[in-house]
């Protein structure tokens, strides 16, 4: 992705130092055509020679198979200063190709160890098998592993809760159904946040923190579904009254625009 979209990471009118030994400055970037305008490059990759390249226009060509991209400049000049021999040269060119290897960048596009959120499931399991003492990183990794399963399943449990709530509130206003859904979603989110906080430091097992919200919401949904199937729905008029009180409180708190 870094190779195929390298022009996105170039900030116009800013000195970009994402590559070892190369300072790149462009006045403007056109992502659609990968065209760079008013390019200035300071190349210090040679230990004894400093090259300064100036060009009014350049283009980027990706080379994903080699992990690099090629910068082609047009109608510019190269100023080279040899520090050891104390000489200077100026070269005019019509086209000049400069290769920049992303893999050699100073960790800007990656290369360092992945954090827990970037790992896939096999990587998370491999880290947990090789982990030594159960420190904060171990618990965070375990939380991420359970989260990759618990969050997708939360959609099923919330849908299970939505069915009986939709049946019970069919005679209420549409806004009440939306508000009721937001209340239960907020309830689920608070439980999930609490589980994450207590699970990441090992207060209780991460599996509890990630799966208990699903079980609670699913249990409520299953209970309401069974009650509706037996034609004994749980009355929720108190939520209607609470919503009416809340709306009156909002109207009372609004400033008078007259």
Image: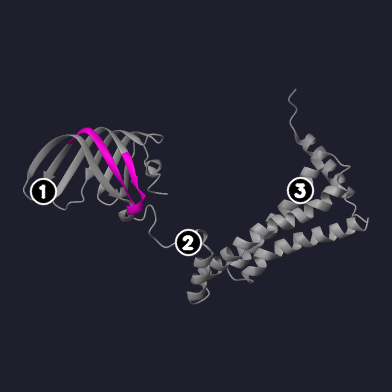
- Quarter-wise, where is residue 225 in the image? bottom right
**Tag 1 or tag 3, which sits nearer the N-term?**
1
Q: Residue at x 13, y 51 (%)?
A: 48
Label 1 Cα crowd, 10 Å radius (few <14 / some 14-19 / many 20+): few
Magenta stretch: includes residue 71:
yes
Q: Mark 1 vs mark 2: give the one in front.
A: 2
Which residue corresponds to mark 1? 83
| 172 on left or right of 67 | right
Mark nearer the N terminus (1 vs 2): 1
Q: Is residue 246 something one can see in this rendering?
A: no
Left or right: 167 with respect to 59? right
- Whole-Å distance between the Cαs marked 2 and 3? 34 Å
Which residue matches tag 2?
Answer: 115
**Which range of residues does the magenta coloring cover?**
60-77
**Magenta span main SS:** strand
Is mark 3 in CB contact (under 8 Å) with mark 1?
Answer: no
Give the residue furthest to the front.
Answer: 65
Q: State how far apart marks 3 and 1 are (Cα).
A: 71 Å
Q: Position of residue 222 (x, y in %)?
A: 81, 60
3D distance between C-alphas at marks 1 and 2: 42 Å
Name the residue: 30% across, 55% down. 104
Viewer-side residue, 246 vs 139: 139
Q: What label does residue 181 carry, if any?
A: 3
Q: Nearer the viewer, mark 3 or mark 1?
A: 3
Residue at the location (34% across, 34% down)?
35
Of mark 2 and mark 3, the one earlier in the sequence is 2
Q: Secondary structure at mark 1?
A: loop
* Quarter of the image that includes the C terminus: top right
């Amino acid at each position: 992705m870094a190779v195929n979209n390298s022009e996105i990471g170039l900030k116009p009118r800013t000195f970009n130092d994402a590559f070892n030994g190369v300072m790149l400055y462009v006045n403007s970037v056109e992502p659609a055509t990968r065209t760079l305008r008013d390019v200035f490059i300071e190349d210090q990759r040679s230990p004894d020679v400093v090259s300064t390249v100036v060009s009014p226009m350049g283009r980027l060509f990706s080379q994903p198979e080699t992990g690099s991209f090629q910068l082609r400049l047009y109608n510019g000049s190269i100023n080279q200063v040899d520090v050891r021999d104390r000489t200077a040269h100026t070269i005019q060119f019509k086209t000049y190709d400069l290769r920049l290897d992303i893999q050699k960048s100073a960790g800007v596009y990656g290369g360092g160890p992945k954090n827990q959120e970037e790992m896939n499931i096999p990587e998370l399991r491999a880290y947990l098998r090789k982990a030594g003492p159960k420190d904060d990183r171990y618990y965070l990794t375990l939380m991420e592993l359970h989260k990759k399963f618990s969050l997708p399943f939360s959609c099923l449990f919330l849908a299970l809760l939505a069915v009986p709530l939709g049946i019970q509130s069919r005679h209420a206003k549409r806004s009440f159904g939306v508000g009721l859904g937001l209340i239960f979603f907020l309830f689920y989110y608070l439980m999930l946040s609490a589980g994450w906080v207590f699970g990441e430091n090992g207060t209780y097992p991460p599996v509890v923190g990630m799966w208990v919200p699903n079980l609670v919401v699913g249990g409520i949904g299953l209970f309401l579904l069974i009650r509706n199937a037996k034609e004994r729905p749980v009355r929720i008029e108190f939520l209607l009254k609470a919503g009416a009180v809340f709306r009156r409180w909002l109207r009372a708190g609004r400033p008078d625009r007259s």
